[in-house]
Every structure is written in C-alpha cells, then in structure tokens.
Amino acid sequence: MARAISLIDEIRRDLEILERKILEHAYVKALEEARISRDKLCLFVGEQYTIIGSDLRSVAHLVTRFGAYPSRDFFLTVLQGEKAAWDSLLVLARAIGMSEESLRLYEPLPGAQAYTCYMAWLALYASDAEIAAAYLVNFPAWGRNCGRLSRVLKERYGFTPNEVGFFDLFATPPPTFEASALAVIQGGLDRGADPRLVSRAARLLQAYELMFWDTLYEASTR
C-alpha cells in the first residue's frame, strides 16, 4: 500500500492550487450570499441529471470490465452511490418545480459536461488504478462543496433536509472509501499501471470538475 499512498500524496500536493479554486469557487459563494435566484438552480439540477445518468452507465461498465479483479467491489460501491444520487436528484428536482420530463428536455452546457465525458473515456480505456485515483482526489473537493450547498439551500433558500439529500450523500462518503481506493490503486500498480497515467487521470478529472463550476457560475449569473 505504501506506493499507492506515496503517489496519492504527491498528486494531492501537485493539485493543491486546483483544489483550492474548487473549494473557494464563486458559484458556492454566490449561493451563500443569495445572489443566485432559486429558479437558476434548475441549471445545477439539469446538468447533474445528465452527469449522473452518464456516470451510472460508466460505472456499470467498470463493474463489467473489472468483474474478475478485486477492484470489482470498489466499483460496485461507487455504482450504488450513483444510484442513490440519481434517486435523490429527482427529489431535489421536484423541490424546484422540475419534472423528469423537463429534465429530459434540458439542454446541457458543454463546459459542465466535460467531467462526465472524460469519466466515460476513463471507463472505456483507463486502468482501475487510474480511475480509483481520479475518484479519490476528486470526491473530497466535490463532497465539501456539496456540504456547503446543503447547508446554504436549507438556511438561505428554504429547502428541507429531505430535499437536499442529494448533497448530503456526497458530503458524507463511506468511511472505508479512501482505504478501498488505495487498495485498488496499489493493486493496479502491482500489475504494472503507469504512475504517470494515474496522476494524469486525477489531474484531468479535477480540472474538469473546476470547469463544471466555472460554467455553472457563468450561466447562473449572466
């Protein structure tokens, strides 16, 4: 496990500035200051409807690809989380007046979808080590922002705890997530996964995460 821990520590150091940009993003701050109107939340929900729908299929493919490897259980856990997120997103959508039909008709923004497009590429071509590292680096930043959004939507926008369950799912990841991801990374490295590609996957997914927030902020405040 030592090689995986060392590699992830190095990746996190290299991406500190990028992570800070995500955690200090203007979109989250604008919501905390109630500078984004409630009706503009349809943009967030509409984008996530496309993202989660795509990620469900991507992770299901990973379960198939790595079904004979120990990493299968890690991806099964991620898949279960994506399904729970999908169900919770529909609750959030109803809270802002969006039906599933309106979600299907929503036209996604290219910059907000770069993350899920890259995730689909990873699901097709990347090693399990690359994908686990990308998740391990990305999920904490996404989760912390989700925690802030859960709080602000209740405090400033009047949502109920049940209605913001989507955010709470990501804000509180399973306690075994990091150890499981590290085990997948170590297993991949032991089988010859290229550390350079592992680092690249984490860097690109994190950069596409920032692109999501940038696009959402621009569309919500224009």
Image (cartoon, helix red, strand yellow):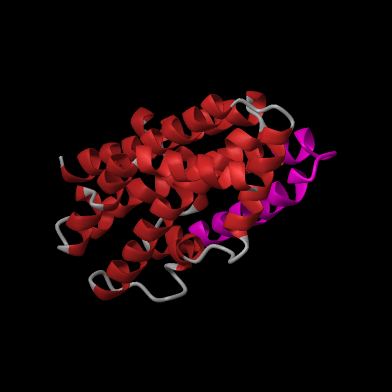
Task: Indicate the quadrant where residue 154 lies.
Answer: bottom left
> Which contiguous range is marked in magenta?
61-90
Considering only vertical position in the picture, is 26 above or below 134? below
The answer to whether residue 101 of the structure is visible from this angle is no
The residue located at (42%, 30%) in the rendering is: 114
Q: Percent position (x, y) of residue 124?
A: 66, 26
Question: Is 196 displayed left or right of 73 in the figure?
Answer: left
The quarter of the picture where the C terminus appears is top left
Residue 179: percent from the left, percent from the top?
Answer: 62, 56
Q: Vertically, is 198 above or below 88?
A: above
Out of 133 and 146, give the one closest to the viewer: 133
On whether residue 72 falls in the magenta region, the answer is: yes
Is the magenta region chiefly helix, strand or loop?
A: helix
Q: Looking at this rendering, what residue extends furthest in the right direction?
A: 68
Give the x, y percent position of residue 96: 36, 61
Number of numbered discs: 0
* Residue 76 pos. (x, y %): 72, 51
Q: Is residue 29 visible?
A: yes
The residue under the point 48% across, 62% down is 166
Report which quarter residue 143 is drawn in.
Answer: bottom left
Residue drawn at (41%, 44%) of the image: 12
Left or right: where 13 falls relative to 55: left
Residue shown at the point (59%, 29%) measured from the top left? 122
Q: Report the front residue among 199 and 124.
A: 199
Name the foreground residue: 31 vs 49: 31
Q: Is residue 11 left or right of residue 4?
A: left
133 drawn magenta: no
